[in-house]
Image: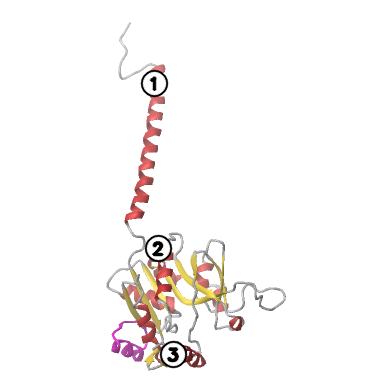
Amino acid sequence: MAPKSICAPDHGEFVMSTKSLILHGLAAAAALAAGAHAYFYYHRSTTKFRSRVVGIIPARFASSRFQGKPLVDILGKPMIQRTWERAKLATTLDCVVVATDDEKIAECCRGFGAEVIMTAESCRNGAERCSEALQKLEKKYDIVVNIQGDEPLIEPEIIDGIVKALQTTPDAVFSTAVTSLKPEDAFDPNRVKCVVDNRGYAIYFSRGLIPFNKSGKTNPEFPYNLHLGIQSYDSEFLKIYPDLTPTPMQLEEDLEQLKVLENGYKMKVIKVDHDAHGVDTPEDVVKIENFMRERNLS
């Protein structure tokens, strides 16, 4: 009887070898998966996600509601200077710049020490201006914080809060903040409202009161949200934002956040305790100056 070839095992040996191979392969695959799983969490714990952050203050002189708003004087300083000074106190920002298409604003900002990026007049909103400025910066950043220039009392902790929200929410490309809506602002179209889901993702933004009940009146028991004029973006998303087609709800409400939601992207929202004092009209300047005097804010 011819000896068995080690290269040609009989059927029984082949089956046993195959089973052994399968079991060995499964064990190896499981070990590899476990290793990859462990590596993933190790990598996440040792490498900060979206770690490089720039704050950009978009500013334009021509405004339909308030011409020259960034340069308006608030107790002896231009409003944009006050916003810049507050932003510089945020611990998560590596850099703060002003993005503008106006030389008067640029000259003013350089005068108090701000870095200025000149952008095109064709930018349709703050997000597009931030997108252009991002691509003109020499350094690379993972997150861009769009800091509205008409929030001269913005708290640095809110800036840090939305940055950390985006850093800890990989499936979101955008983060922003809301605070409690005051009853007197319920039907003011300059005060943007926001509704969120149970996981803290934005559902919708509106200049009207949302949600709106069938009585047509505010419900004093309902926690309505007021959107604050600050938001952060994943930088790769911000680069493509201007190329996204404008959407129906965005155009109807004139709110740039809606283009993000209508295109299916996720937006993380944090709620903060903030006595909002945005400047939308000349009348708001008087209100904010009175507020600052009452609290001895210089």
Q: Position of residue 148 (x, y in %)?
A: 43, 80
- Give the image quarter of residue 212: bottom right
Q: Which residue is mark 3?
A: 69
Q: Which mark is residue 125?
A: none
> Which range of residues does the magenta coloring cover?
99-118
Question: Are there few (<14), some (14-19), or many (20+) residues within 10 Å of tag 3?
Answer: many
Q: Which residue is mark 1?
A: 14
| In the foreground, 292 or 243 | 292
Badge 2 amino acid: Gln
N-terminal-most mark, 3 or 2: 3
Question: Are there few (<14), some (14-19), or many (20+) residues within 10 Å of tag 1?
Answer: few
Where's the C terminus, which quadrant? bottom left
- Is residue 119 in view? no
Nearer to us: label 3 or label 2 = 2
N-terminal-most mark, 2 or 1: 1
Residue 63 higher or lower than 240, as above or below: below
Q: Position of residue 217 (x, y in %)?
A: 68, 79
Q: Which residue is mark 2?
A: 167
**Going by the image, does 200 lie left or right of 145?**
right
Separation (CA) of disc 1 from disc 3: 82 Å
Where's the N terminus, which quadrant? top left
| In the foreground, 13 or 108 | 108
N-terminal-most mark, 1 or 3: 1
Q: Is residue 73 magenta?
A: no
**Going by the image, does 72 lie left or right of 218?**
left
What SS does tag 2 mark? helix
Q: Is residue 112 magenta?
A: yes
Q: Please tell me which residue is depicted at 46% across the width and 68% down the height of the picture.
A: 175
Badge 1 amino acid: Phe
Separation (CA) of disc 3 from disc 2: 32 Å
What SS does tag 1 mark? helix
- Is residue 52 in view? yes
